[in-house]
Amino acid sequence: MTLISVDGDDSDERLAERVAAQRAKPGFALDGHFYRSRRVYRKELDEILYKSWLYAGHVSQIANPGDYFLYDLGEDSIIIARGQDGAVRALMNICRHRGARVCEAAQGHRTSFVCPYHGWTYNLDGSLKAARAMAVKPGFEPARYGLKTARCIVYEGLIFVNANPEAADFEAALRTIEPALRPYGLPSAKIAHRQIYTVEANWKLVLENYQECYHCATAHRAYAKLHTIERPESEVKDITASMLERAERQTGVPGITHAHYQAYGASRGFGTCVYTSRYALYDGYRTGSEGGQPVAPLMGEFKGYDGGAGDFQIGPLAFMLNYPDHCVLYRFTPRSPTRTDMELVWFVRGDAEEGRDYDREAVTWLWDRTTKEDEYIISRNSAGVNSRFFEPGPYHPEFESLCLEFVDWYLGALE
Ligand code: FES
Ligand SMILES: [Fe+2]
C-alpha cells in the first residue's frame, strides 16, 4: 500500500505538530498521519509495543521442558521456551555472534538452540553453551554472550512478555481481575483452535474496531442477535440487572460479577491495562454459538449458565470474551505500518475431547465469522483513512468511549 500523505514530510516536527493538532480536537478520530507514517510506527514500537505487557501464548503450548514457540511482533521474534528447570523464559531470537535468527521453526522441542549460521549453541535458559572454535580468541567469556531476554510472567496459564527491563509490575494489576478470571480454570484449559487473521490495516484501526460495538449492529448480525452490548446501556439495563442478580446462583461461582477497570490512562503502570465486567446475552441464549446454546463442557468452576459473558482486557493489546463453556482470546500484533495479525485462541475445558465433548466448528463458528466480518470492514476503513481526502469525524461518546481513552493514552505515549 502506498502511503501518500507522508511521502513528502515524515519528520519528528510533523509528528509533534500532528499530536498537538489532535490534542486540540478532543473527541475526534485520529488523523490519517498516525496510520500512515513510518516514523510514527517506529515510535509506537519503541514507546508502546516494547514497553507493554503482551500476551505471548498459553502454557499448554510448552507443556514439557524443551518445548518452545516463537512470538513474532513488529520486525522481531521472541523464543518462549520452557527450561529444564520448568521455568518459562522469553529469549530474543537474535544470535549474540552476528545476529542471525537462532530459531526458525514456529514451534517445537529442543535440547538447545543452535544458530544455523556459525553454530553457536544456546541452552534453553538462553545461556551460551558453546561457541564453535572461539576458544582461540583470548579473553572470550561465553557467560557474556547469552541470548538477550525479555521479562516474562505466567498468570492463570497465560504467558506475558515485556521487552522493557524496567516494566511496571503486571501481576499486581492482574490480581485485580482475578475473581472474575480464575473461575474459568485457564491454567488447565485446552486450546481447541488457534488462528491468525492477517489484516491489511494499521494496528490501531484493528484495536479501535475491537474497542467499540457501535459497528456490531451493522457489521455483525450473528453476534448482535446474542450480545446486548450492541445496544446502548440504557436500553438493556433491565436485562443486565437480572443477569447480574442471578449470575452467582446459576454459575455457582462466587464473585463472578466482579468488575474492575484500570485500562490505558487509568492503569497502575504503563502497559499494564486490565479490565473486566460481565455483560448479558439476550434472553434464551446461554453462550456465544450459532444458536446460543452450549458447545462444550462447562469451564473450570462453572456449574451452570447465567446468560452472561465475561469481558476482559489483559494488557493493551489483548482481550478475552469468556462464556461458561468456552473462552475466546484476541491478540493484536502490529507487523508493519499497514499490516496487523489478529490472533484468536479458543479455549475449552482441559479434559474435553474433540468429537466427543465438543465440535471444533461449533466452538469457533461465531467468532470466526465475526472476525472475518471485522477483517473486511477494517480493510475498508484502512482504505479510507489512507486517502488524502480523509478528514476524521467525532467518536460516539458512549459506544466509542474506549477508543477515546485509548487515543488519549496513545497520544500521551507519543508525547
Ligand atoms: S550469527 Fe549465529 S553463530 Fe554466527
Ligand atoms: Fe467487530
Image (cartoon, rainbow, N blue to C red):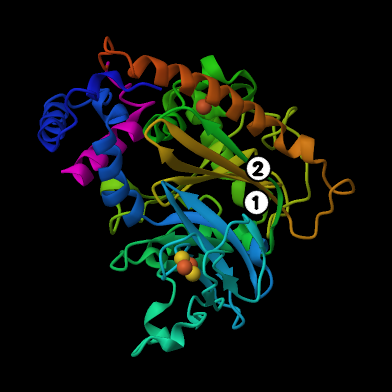
Camera-nearest residue between 277 and 4: 4
Boundaries of the magenta span? 393-415
> The residue under label 2 is which amino acid type?
Asp
> Do callouts 2 and 1 mark residues in contact (Cβ within 8 Å)?
yes
Q: Is mark 2 within 8 Å of ligand 2?
A: no
The residue where tag 2 is placed is 306
In this view, 350 is above or below 327: below
Question: Outermost residue, right direction?
Answer: 356
| Residue 295 locus on image (x, y percent) | 78, 40
| Residue 401 locus on image (x, y percent) | 33, 31
**From the viewer's perspective, is 281 left or right of 89?**
right
Q: Nearer the viewer, mark 2 or mark 1?
A: 2
Badge 2 marks a residue whose secondary structure is loop
Badge 1 marks a residue whose secondary structure is helix
The residue where tag 1 is placed is 249
Camera-nearest residue between 143 and 321: 143
Q: Residue at x 42, y 70 (%)?
A: 97
Where's the N terminus, which quadrant?
top left
- Crowdedness near tag 1: few (<14), some (14–19) or many (≥20) residues, C-alpha within 10 Å: some
In this view, 60 is above or below 219: below
In the rendered structure, does residue 395 fall within the stretch colored magenta?
A: yes
> The residue under label 1 is which amino acid type?
Arg
| Residue 261 locus on image (x, y percent) | 37, 49
- Crowdedness near tag 2: few (<14), some (14–19) or many (≥20) residues, C-alpha within 10 Å: many
| Displayed quadrant of residue 148 | bottom left
Earlier sequence position, callout 2 versus callout 1: 1
Q: Is residue 231 shown to the viewer in this render?
A: no
| Residue 290 locus on image (x, y percent) | 73, 28
